[in-house]
Image (cartoon, grey):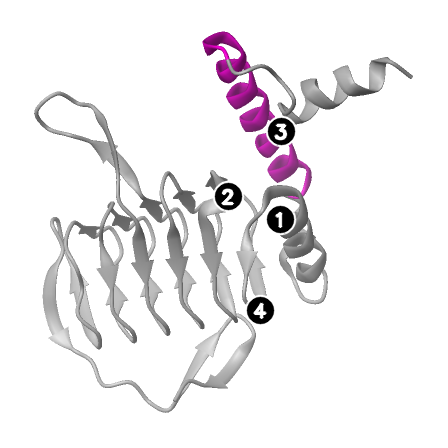
Amino acid sequence: MRWLPACWCLIFGTGLKNDENMIYLRVTLRRFWISMIQSVFDCPFLWQPPMHRFKAAAYRFLLGVHFKGECLIHSGVRILNPGNLVIGNYCSLVYGCIIECRNKVAIGDNTIIGPQAFITAGGHAPADLSPTTRSVSIGKNVFIGARAMILQGVRIGDNSIVGAGAVVVKDVPPNTVVGGVPAHEIRRLERAGRIWTGFGEINCE
């Protein structure tokens, strides 16, 4: 049974020494483990109710994602550093979206992240390209369109819409529609008392 601790270290990257080589090995093993788990649970039928609960449980207990309620995670979704991700109730992460959590990323209730959207809490300083991280906050009842990009440090207010292909580099006020590169305000938005989510129509007041 002496081989068990060694296997644990190799699979999870824990229990290794803290010199430079071992830190690199631990990070590499952890990224491999996260990638394997997301690939295993990438079956199309696992995002549909009621099987979505099984997939969310795997993401919670094996990857460390913080869920505040129900969440639909479609096929092809990829989350980097999932322990920094907080997801509200009745959210949907649609096909192929990528969430890069180098810092905390918080997603509010009833929010939909569209196909192939990209959210990152990291980047590089223009002067010397050194890594930088700033948290990202997305409010309640927000819709992020297909292939939109949300960059580090951005705050998106409640009831807002980010148009498809937009690149959001600064905060978005509540009840606002933005689009373009870089994203700019298109118009103000008045939301109804109910909103459609992947779980059906719900009260959002």
The residue range painted magenta reads 19-41
Sequence-wise first label, 1 or 3: 3
Q: Amino acid at mark 2?
A: Pro
Sequence-wise first label, 3 or 4: 3
Tell me whether the residue at label 2 lies in contact with that at label 1, contact meaning CB atoms closer than 8 angstroms.
yes
Tell which of 12 and 164 is nearer to you: 12
Sequence-wise first label, 2 or 4: 4
Quadrant including the C terminus: bottom left
Q: Residue 138's x, y, as percent?
A: 32, 62
Identify the element where label 4 is drawn.
loop
Question: On the image, numbered disc 2 is attached to which residue?
Answer: 82
Answer with left or right where residue 7 lies relative to residue 67.
right
Q: Amino acid at mark 1?
A: Tyr
Q: Residue at x 45, y 46 (%)?
A: 84
Sequence-wise first label, 2 or 1: 1
Q: Residue at x 76, y 15 (%)?
A: 6
**Which quadrant of the structure image shows residue 160?**
bottom left
Tell me whether the residue at label 2 lies in contact with that at label 3, contact meaning CB atoms closer than 8 angstroms.
no
Q: Amino acid at mark 3?
A: Trp
CA neighbours of label 2 inside 10 A, class few (<14), some (14 to 19), many (20+): many
Q: Amino acid at mark 4?
A: Gly
Q: Which mark is residue 69?
A: 4
User: Is residue 83 shown to the viewer in this render?
Assistant: yes
Q: Residue at x 15, y 30 (%)?
A: 125
Q: Residue at x 45, y 10 (%)?
A: 20
Tell me whether the residue at label 2 lies in contact with that at label 4, contact meaning CB atoms closer than 8 angstroms.
no
- Magenta stretch mostly in which secondary structure? helix
Question: On the image, numbered disc 1 is attached to which residue?
Answer: 59
Question: On the image, numbered disc 3 is attached to which residue?
Answer: 33
Answer with left or right where residue 200 lies relative to residue 99.
right
